[in-house]
Image (spheres, grey):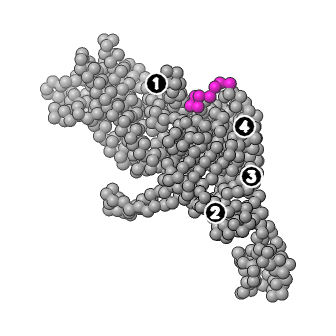
Amino acid sequence: MRTLYLTFHVYLAFVTKSFQKRMQYRVANLAGLTTNFFFLLVHIFVYTAFYAARTGPLSLNLNEIITYFVLCQVFFMLMPFWGARSEVTSAIKDGSVALQLTKPVDFQAYWFSDECGRACYYLLMRGLPTFLISIIFFAVAIPTQPITVMAFAVSITLATFMSAAITITVFSFAFWTLDTTGFSGLSYSIITLFSGMLVPIALWPEWLAHIAAWLPFGGLIDIPFSIYLGKITGMDIWIAIGKQMIWVVFFLGLGRILLKRGFSRLVIQGG
Amino acid sequence: MIEVNNLSKTFKVYHHRKGFFGSFMNLFSRKHRLVQAVDSVSFSVARGEIIGYLGPNGAGKSTTIKMLTGILVPTSGSVTVNGYIPHRQRKENAKRIGVVFGQRSHLWFDLPVQESFELLQRIYRIPEAQYRHNVEVFDALLGLGDFFRTPVRQLSLGQRMRADIAAALLHNPDVLFLDEPTIGLDVVAKARIREFIQQINAERQVTVVLTTHDLDDVEKLCKRVILIDNARLCFDGELAALRRLLSTERILSVDYAETYSDISIPNAQVIYQEESRVQYRFSPEAISTADLIGAILQRFKIVDISVQEPDIEELIKTVYEDNLTLAQKLAEADVIDLTNRKRIS
């Protein structure tokens, strides 16, 4: 039990240090905040125009759509591939990642902690201000039921874990390709689409939404935001959260295998 | 403390086809060749020893160190450090060793040195008292106080190296691996680091494995050196013995009055020639210095002449250049019978 506590203690320290080191770049963060609002405005204008021109009823009303895209910007930096990545990825490229193996630390857990620290940082320094400013200027819906708030908190945490696990998996390909821009670019497109980042899945044609439901990426955005908007209720909430959990475990497992194989073939580059 | 037996490592190096079509083909079939990075190397290091692990670039030094630290899995042969098999018991081994790679920092780039140290304290579960004591001692010896609160990315190379070495010793490791710890440093910084290593080694009986291209490091720190070249071990013994052995060879530098076409002298080998300036290598056993100079004076006009004992750098170059002669010499001199040694192991 004590060992478990001490182990947790170590990785918690990684989380906080990851948070701390990002505090050094606060000005860059301010610039990022502006970008968030730029994209938020673009989305809001496009959808306002779209809703004004619509003929039939849609599964999300304009108010919900605006809330949806505010949430997208609030949690934008917590999602995989968007924004600056940790130095771990460049460490794989130049081979210095091998040095991590000289420490008595599990590498995946270390990287995961680093990603979590990063998520905490962006939640606090980017997400929170975005949210606070948005509720002043836009009609953002705020959930009233405690169960919704709780379920959303759990779901968004799982989404963050999934994001970290996916990031590790995708960037582990650097062991093979040395440059992941191609692969991560491809993943970026797929995830942007199938997570519901670009267009909420609720507005998709049924057959395409059906495909999305079988893919893991809805767990990043569609599931937590639908819970927030009260589109998923009752028992379905727990099914959705269970789905997220399964995908988190899946990506952690996949990442673990890739890292293990990656490390065994590393080493050639750089004496 | 360290036992290495018949250790070998072979790498597959993939051949990359050129061009777009080529890289497409790479996806399906890839040609590779095998590169022997370390070839049946055996040695052992006792507790408290400082050994210099030397060799030219690409000789297999780093590969060996990586196998000793658990980063790499050997192709064949065995390694134990502290009784642990590094690649199988990576974490256990990691707790008992300290590693410094001169070219790369272990510290967290964006964090102040102190924060990195505190993180290490948690990683290695260092008791508070031990941590404080170590920081105090290292501060006194290395002057960490001046930059303890500075982010690592703002440190000078010398400061960073001091911080890195101190960081590697916080958890009182039994073995310290230093890979080019003085690379790029000025004379004062080098001296400081050497002194520190010496002191830590003497006081704490830390075993040190040092790879370096700086032969001053070797001379100041190591009694024993291991040379590897072309993946093979070519000398293992006292530095003094190596020098004694090889300093039978001397260098004679001559400035001739004019450029001669044939400057060969029996029993002396021309190792350098640029216009009228020539260097000969000779062994005093084959020809005495006086006879050699006599022979030169008989045939040529000279401006200047001098004899040097080769320094250690020169010695090691000789070893690298033809290690067969060295092996023979070693066998003759009976300092260490290399051929025999190999057969035993």
In the rendered structure, the residue with mark 3 lies on which chain? B
**CA distance for labels 2 and 1:** 68 Å
Which mark is on residue B340? Answer: 2
Label 2 vs 3, first from the N-terminus: 3
Label 4 vs 3, first from the N-terminus: 4
Q: Is residue B76 visible in the rendered structure shown here? A: yes
Q: Do the residues labelled 4 and 3 touch (CB within 8 Å)?
A: no
Q: How crowded is mark 3: few (under 14 residues within 10 Å), some or many (20 or more)?
A: some
Quarter of the image holding residue B333? bottom right
The amino acid sitting under disc 4 is Arg
**CA distance for labels 1 and 3:** 56 Å
**CA distance for labels 2 and 3:** 23 Å
Which mark is on residue A124? Answer: 1
Label 2 vs label 4, nearer the camera: 2
User: Do discs 2 and 4 share a chain?
Assistant: yes
The residue that mark 3 highlights is B223
State the count of labels.
4
The amino acid sitting under disc 1 is Leu
Label 2 vs 4, first from the N-terminus: 4
Where A109 sits versus B37, above or below?
A: above
The residue that mark 4 highlights is B204
In the rendered structure, the residue with mark 2 lies on which chain? B
Of A161 and B210, which appears nearest the observer?
B210
Q: In this view, does A243 lie to the left or right of B319?
A: left
Q: In this view, does B6 lie to the left or right of A223?
A: right
What residue lies at 81% left-to-right and 80% top-to-bottom? B292
